[in-house]
Image (spheres, coloured by chain):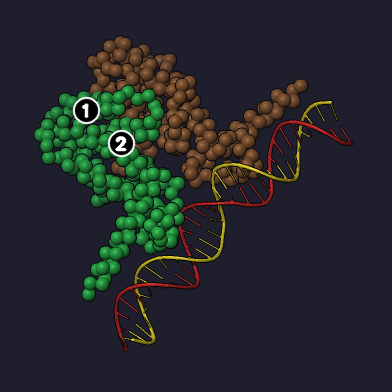
Chain colours: A green, B brown, C yellow, D red
Amino acid sequence: MGVKERRTREKEQLRRQILSAARELFVNEGYESVSMRKIANKIEYSPTTIYLYFEDKADLLDSVCKETLLDLLNTLERLKEDTSDPVEALRKSGKAYVEFGLKYPQDYKLTFVIRPQFQKGLGLQQGSVGEKVFDYLRAMVSECIRQKAFRQVDLETTGQALWSAVHGVTLLLIDFSDFPWTEKDKLIDMVIDTMIDGLKA
Amino acid sequence: MGVKERRTREKEQLRRQILSAARELFVNEGYESVSMRKIANKIEYSPTTIYLYFEDKADLLDSVCKETLLDLLNTLERLKEDTSDPVEALRKSGKAYVEFGLKYPQDYKLTFVIRPQFQKGLGLQQGSVGEKVFDYLRAMVSECIRQKAFRQVDLETTGQALWSAVHGVTLLLIDFSDFPWTEKDKLIDMVIDTMIDGLKA
DNA sequence: TAATTTAACTTAACACTGTTAATTTTATCA
DNA sequence: TGATAAAATTAACAGTGTTAAGTTAAATTA
């Protein structure tokens, strides 16, 4: 009775194939410039086959972004081990966040700029990977407050403010690549360090 | 010989009409969802007429964004008069920047997210309005450093870091409108105040 | 093995897209 | 009025996301 299992496996495999082709095209040509036909051509199926695996183009984007968020979450949680100093841990997480965005700039934009445009109302629901990323950030901040390294700030607001800062520098560096930035790492450090300094006790 | 002058005026008028229709549609339906035909319908001309006044759709976007930047620059420079305290002036400018973005969220996104995607290599050239906006920010920061309200930080990097922070919070509030933000103004103040505190002498 | 049911996939079609070249209409000047 | 220049239009190209209907292939049953 291994037939059903094999079929399920085969379906899963094609689903991944579609997803991988979609990601590559989205990243290289931009979400709007990629057509269902292009994706279909890449995997050598007819365009409508994709609709048997995904609701529509936006759903395809959604699935690609969920993978990206998982990747980001893994990257961040891999840092958790070392560093007993909570402020240093937060700083490192901030750097890792921005560096993730700059390493995969188009994936980052898909997830944090394009997707919200096409998935309004589904930004960050309960149990989502996106929520877990923010949970991670909240825990970092919480530890800084608990150990009195930060002054008595509001946990939620502080987390959101830090997210704002790292999101901002990431996007500016991606979008305005021809702007006469000072040395990239200097800017990233400046953003993160200034925020952290402003929060210190 | 007022014929040529009238013609010039009429051409300018139609140009503005196109621009205004384009802005309204871009803002309400999103750049990619707006077709040249839709714009043409709105002004009751044939689609190709637009090409006599603008190079292409991206040029139309470019012109719309230049207007937005002028509007932003005016909004900021109107603050210049009052406030002798340079730090307070910077804080007010930061707030005004974010509030401008939230008052015209789609115009802000067109200018600072969509346009760079379609106008790569023209992000912020010499003499552009965009450059003037950043000049304004630089002057604010410069004054804070000159009056020793800020510690001896690098002018360029500091300006860019502040831009990152306000850009980030503006975009997050626009894009993730369903995220459980703490009170909006509380967050905006937190971002700006924390950055400024981190820069103080 | 042959017929039937189910799953997987494809073809054809709809009303659209940005942009170009060729053409027609409208306005100005001699 | 007729020629010239400017302005606006029509027709066409190769493409878009998505749906409904039709076809092929695989699995199950008799």
Q: Which mark is residue B22?
A: none
Question: How many numbered callouts?
Answer: 2
Comparing labels 1 and 2, the label whose residue is closer to the camera: 2
- Residue A168 position within the rendered picture, expressed as x and y whole percent measured from the top left: 33, 33
Image side of residue B62 versus residue A157, left or right:
right
Q: Circle 1 marks a residue in which chain? A: A
**Residue picked out by circle 2:** A102
Of A149 and B110, which appears nearest the observer? Answer: B110
Image position, residue B111 (x, y; %):
45, 33
What amino acid does circle 2 point to? Leu
- Spot occupied by residue B39 in the image (x, y as percentages of width and height): 58, 42
Residue B109 visible in the current orientation: no
In the image, what residue type sits under mark 1?
Answer: Ile
**Image quarter in which the N terminus of chain B is found:** top right
Q: Which mark is residue A196?
A: 1
Secondary structure under tag 2 reads helix
Is B127 placed above or below A6 here?
above
Rendered image quadrant of residue A54: bottom left
What is the crowding at mark 2: few (fewer than 14 residues within 10 Å), some, or many (at least 20)? some
The earlier-in-sequence mark between 1 and 2 is 2
CA gap between label 1 and label 2 equals: 21 Å
Which residue: 13% across, 29% down? A148
Q: In percent of the image, x 16 and y 34: which residue is there?
A: A89
Q: Nearer the viewer, residue A140 or A30?
A: A30
The C terminus of chain B - image quarter: top left
Tell me if I can see residue B51 in this picture.
yes
Is label 1 on the same chain as label 2? yes
**Pointers 1 and 2 in contact (C-beta within 8 Å):** no
Callout 2: chain? A
State whether residue B189 is above or below residue A132: above
The residue sitting at 61% across, 34% down in the picture is: B53
Q: Residue at x 46, y 29 (%)?
A: B122
